Every structure is written in structure tokens, then in C-alpha cells.
Amino acid sequence: MSSFLYDLIGLVAGVCFILALKGLSHPRTARRGNLLGAAGAGIATLLVFFRSENEGRNLGWIIGAIIVGVIVGVPAARRVQMTAMPQLVALFNGVGGGAAALVAIVEYMKLGDSASFAVVLATVFTVVVGCVSFSGSIITFLKLQELMTTAPVVFPGGRAVIAGTLGGVIGVSGWVIAELGTTPLLILAALSLLFGVLFVLPVGGADVPIVISLLNAFTGLTVAASGYVLDATLLIIAGTLVGASGTILTRLMAEAMGRSLFGTLFGAFTAKAQASGGAADTRPVKSGTPDDVAILLNYARRVVIVPGFGLAVAQAQHTVRELADLLSAKGIDVAYGIHPVAGRMPGHMNVLLAEANVPYEQLSEMDEVNPTFPQTDVALIIGANDVVNPAAKTTPGCPIYGMPILDVSLAGNVIFLKRSMRPGFAGIENELLYDPKTTLLFGDAKASLTKVVSALKVL
């Protein structure tokens, strides 16, 4: 294939990536955007086979790697539950960073002493950031999957250890640049992997989505740098797009959580210890039956439904849609209050409700729905906890303090669907549960909502 044709097709793939990002910016066009992105990735993958210097080389290894990737990736993506989507994103992101680092190491070993200064710099950057992204993403996966504690992991002298490890990474980077050689590069990779772990351990579960977005941006930058090492323009385009969009998303998420990025990453070292909430377990709460909830809803004029992680766990989105349609048929104004990080990932609830064909017009973002809560008769909270917890406003030093929340406490009545009194992902009590105007409906969200729907139909 001629160089001109190769570059032209590569440009088409790059345009697909740009249009994909544009499509993903709105729920109505997200599916088309996703398909465009997949088409661009497919074109980019096929294009590698026709690059003049690659023709006929290592075809067996390349095809074998593609087959392994398909065998692992397709079932994982098809079978993953909506509740585990953030974990899947974290894993896929980490694999991308690790792959970029490995490619840079192999290319560096191939070039040897003939590598230019610019290529060595790009290689060092790719190895450091790629390894940090890989090991950090593994820790975010373990936290989200609750295979390790979701609380910040801190230890005496932690800041000094992190600073020392970072100093080691910088020092060995200089060693690689000054002397060249595979040994210092492998030491650099090992130190970078360690730093990635230490980088993420102090982050609490509630802030993990921000770190996933940051690591995603890191992966994009490593791909762009590896594109420079490989002289692959398409990798530079794709990596830059991911790095830029990931950086923007990280900033927006930090604002949505009321955090500075530094506070998210290292706030655990300066946070004050919180008093235990043991006394909360003995306080009375007001629980109700599906019939009680149905009566409250039946005589409401406006209802705001607040979906959360528990809704995804119960796969109750279709039942919620049925309930909303039934209320609308009775002349009741229904809206969905969506917090930016409800469900542990941006857009998680939007995607879940889209599965049930919930009209996008009924979805109201936090800033839009909060002023309406004083005029709302019933706020129906389904599996959300941290995003409605008043502690974010009233308890300095708690893991979610400063995070903007949905002001459901301003509604006339609050109905809380929960499996138990267990705290949310941030691990803190929700004082809203003990509010006199809050009614708790215990049980699986889907089963509870099904009973509420049945009771509403006869009223």
C-alpha cells in the first residue's frame, strides 16, 4: 500500500474517533457514536497489516493475539452486569496502558543505541505513565469489586514513601536517558508499577470514579507517546483524543464531587478520624409496606425518582419505567433526578434507564432538579445513598464532605428503597434515613417496586 493511501485511510479512522466522541456527548446519539468508534478501531487494526514495513511480518503472532483478545474481550463485554461496568472500564483501561508500556520497551530494545534522544524521552514517558495506569487501574478494579477495602489505605509515613518512590522514578528516568540500556528501563517499569499502586491506595471508594477517569487520560497520553516511538500518526491522534477527553472528564467529575484533584488523591493523609456511628444502629426508623408507598404516590402531584447503584443491582429499570408510566397516566408529574456519579460512573444511570426506554426528557440533572424538590411531594430513592446523604453538607472531614448532592430532604415525603440499613459505598451513615418524613421500604428493589405497581393499579 502506498504511503499516501495509508495516511488517507488512517485519517478516515481518526475522523471516526472524533465523531465517536461527539456522538457520546448525548444519550440520543451515544449508540451511533459507539459504533463509529468501533468502526474506527477496526479500520485502524486492519490498516496495520497493510503498512509497507509490516507486510508479511509476524502475521502468526498478530493474528494469534487478535484471536486471544476476541476470545477474552467479547464474552467479558457481553456478560458483564451493568453494576460491574465501572470495573470493566478500569480493567480495559489498565490493559491499554500496560500494552503501550510493553510496546515501548520492545521498540526500545530493538532500536538499542540507535534510538534518538526524542525517542528515548518518549519511551521513558510511555513506560512510566503506562505502568502507573496499569497498576493503578488494577487497584481501582479491586476497590470497585470490593475484593479489598474501599476505604482509603494509609500507613505511617505514607506520604514520604510515595514521595520517595516518585523520586526514584524520576532518578531512574534520568539514568535511562543518560546511559541507555535495558536494565535501567526494566527497573523504571518496576518502580512505576509500585508508584501506581501507592498512587491509588489512599483514594476512598467514593472518589474511585475520578481516579478511573484520570488513569484513562494517562493511558491516552501513553498511547500518543508510543505512537511517536513507532512513528504511527494514528496512534498519536487516538491517544491525544483519549488523553484530552479524559482530562476534561476528570475535571468535570472532580467539580461534580466537590473535590480538588489533589484532595481526591491525597486527602486521606490529612483527613480527621470520624467518630463511629454505632449509636445510629439503635435509632428508630419509619418503615412502610408497598401499600403505604402506593398511597403516598397515588395522592402526589409531583414525584422525583432518584436511581442509584441498588437499582442496577436489582435490574429494576423496567419496573421503574412501568411505575413512572402508571403515575403519569394518573396525571402525576414524574421526573428522574440524576446525580453525575450515581452508580459509580458518569452516565451509569442514563445508560441503565435507556435500556428501559425511559424518555430522555424525563431525566433531570442535579442542577436542574434540585430547585424543584421544595415543590415535590414525594422523592422516591431507589438504591442511591451517598448522592443524597446530607453528611456531604453537614459533616466536615467525612469521605463525601463537599460533594454536591441531590437535595431530596427538601421534598414533602421521602421514600427510601433499601435492602438493609448498611451504609453506602462511602461507608458512612445517612442521617436522612432517620428523618421523620422518610419511609423505608426494605427488600429487593425490583420485588418491592413490583408490589408497589400492583397496589397502585387498584387505587
Image (cartoon, grey):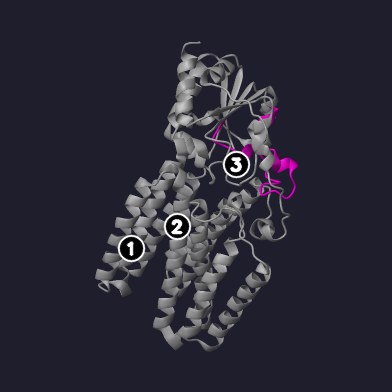
Q: Position of residue 357 (x, y in %)?
A: 44, 30
Q: Residue furthest top?
A: 459
- Mark 2–mark 3 Cα distance, whole angstroms, equals 26 Å
Residue on which disc 1 sits: 47
Q: From the viewer's perspective, is 426 left or right of 269?
A: left
The amino acid type found where label 2 is placed reads: Leu
Please give the name of the residue rendered at 54% of the width and 60% of the height, measured from the top-left corner: 215
Q: Nearer the viewer, mark 2 or mark 3?
A: 3
**Element on which disc 1 rests:** helix
Q: Earlier in the sequence, mark 2 or mark 1?
A: 1
**Counting other residues with Cα less than 10 Å from the Cα at mark 2, is it few (<14), some (14-19), or many (20 or more)?**
many
Label 1 crowd (10 A; few <14 / some 14-19 / many >=20): some
The three-letter amino acid code for the residue at tag 1 is Leu
Q: How many numbered marks appear?
A: 3
Residue 91 marker: 2
Tell me where the magenta segment starts and ends, as one range.
Answer: 381-410
